[in-house]
Every structure is written in structure tokens, then in C-alpha cells.
Amino acid sequence: MDQFIELFKHLINPEWIINHGGLYLLLIIIFAETGLFVGFFLPGDSLLFVAGIYGGLLSNAFYDVPFFLIMFMIAVAGVLGNFVGFWFGRKSGPLLFSRKDTLLFKKKHLYQAKEFYDKHGGGAIFLARFLPIIRTFAPIVAGIVGMDKKKFMFFNIISSFTWVFSMMLAGHYLDKAFPSLKEHLELIVIILILITTLPVIIKLFFSKPKHASPPHVD
């Protein structure tokens, strides 16, 4: 149990992920966090920002490929993660809404994502990419409600590349402008988590999601 807790602490620590898992672990986490419902707790925004700061290290450790290619691969991982979530939603359908809550699965997250999807339509896939927790469940809900696959992939690709490139380039260029940025990574990560996660957490825990009937799937 202690080992599991220790691993969990590492998996939510962006700097540890970059230093110990490198690009491979980063790709796996972005894939899981953007489409597998068990990955909603993983870091997304903060991990990409820190990856931008350590962009040179990631490039050197992976055959000295250009930083642009590193960002491209990570964006593709985000696209694939969302697509797997969409496929899972299509296959599972309303059965997922009748599933009992577990440690890693909370039905309220699905309802929250569905409410967000109903409000914003296809653009929800783009907007959700920038919202922790919501971005994990939005593609699943899109699959459940039967969103057109071509429309989904359009928003999926655009949102993933916009999200990854904006976060990583922000970290990359801010590090160049402020070389001492690495000395304050913990504080920066905390601020990023608060900025991106707090509004979602407030809505999740202090608003009453509309527990409508599970969506009908043709």
C-alpha cells in the first residue's frame, strides 16, 4: 500500500515524470489523461508546462530530435487518447451511466462532462481540452451521445495541438526569459493547478449536476 501511495505521489508530480520517465512516460500519461476515465487524476496542463521548460532535456534524451517534433508526438498522444475515449463511449453507451461508483470511477464526472457537452455542442471537445477532469470524460460522452466521427476528429485534432503547443511553448519561452524559473517549479505547478483545476472542482462539488436520464444511443 505504501508503494502504491508513493507511486501515486510521483505520477502527480510533473518534474518527477520528466526526470525519471522522460518522453515515454509523458506520452503515456497524456494519452491516459485525455481519454481513459481512470486517468482523470493525472497532471495535464502542469505536466506540459514543465515539459516545455525541460524541452531541451527531452530532445537530447530522444535522439536529439527537434523540440517541435517532441511537441508533435505529445499532441498525437492526446489525439489518440481522446479517440480511445470516444470509441469507448460508443461501445459502452448508457451502460456506463448505470455503473456504480468506484475508487477510480465517479459517475458525477460523466454527468458533469455531459452537461458541459450539451451546453457547448461540438466546441465542447475543444474547450474541454483546457479543463482538467472534464477533458478526460468529454470524448467518452461524445461517443455515448453519438457525435459524428468526422466532426469529433476535427475538434479532437485541433484542440490537442492547440493545447499541447500553447502549454509547452509557454513553458519553453518563459524559461528562456526567466532562467531562474526552474528554481520555483513547485510554486509554479501549484499555481497552474489552482488556476486550471479550482473552477472545475468548485463546479463539481458545489453545484448540482443535472442527473438526467442516460442518453439514448441508436
Image: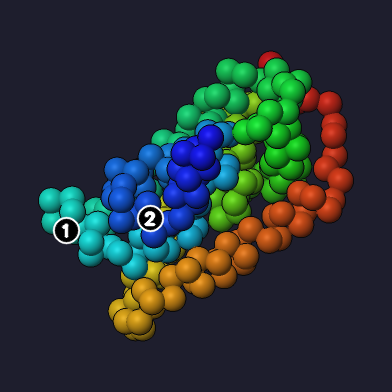
110 is higher (above) or lower (below) than 185 = above
Q: Is residue 4 left or right of residue 171?
A: right
The answer to whether one can see residue 150 in this image is no
Q: Is residue 68 left or right of residue 147?
A: left
- Say whether marks 2 and 1 touch (CB < 8 Å): no
Q: Earlier in the sequence, mark 2 or mark 1?
A: 2
87 is higher (above) or lower (below) than 79 = above
Q: Which residue is mark 2?
A: 16
Q: Is residue 95 left or right of residue 36?
A: right
Residue at 62% in and 33% down? 104
In the image, farthest residue toward the front = 2
Where's residue 159, x and y in %? Answer: 49, 51
Where's residue 86, x and y in %? Answer: 54, 30
Identify the image quadrant of residue 183.
bottom left
Residue at 23% in and 64% down? 56
Gap between marks 2 and 1 measured at Cα: 17 Å
Residue at 62% in and 65% down? 194
Q: Which residue is mark 1?
A: 60
Closer-to-camera residue (88/216):
88
199 is higher (above) or lower (below) than 91 = below
Identify the image quadrant of residue 95.
top right
Residue at 72% in and 21% down? 99
Q: Secondary structure at mark 1?
A: helix
Q: Quadrant of the C terminus?
A: top right
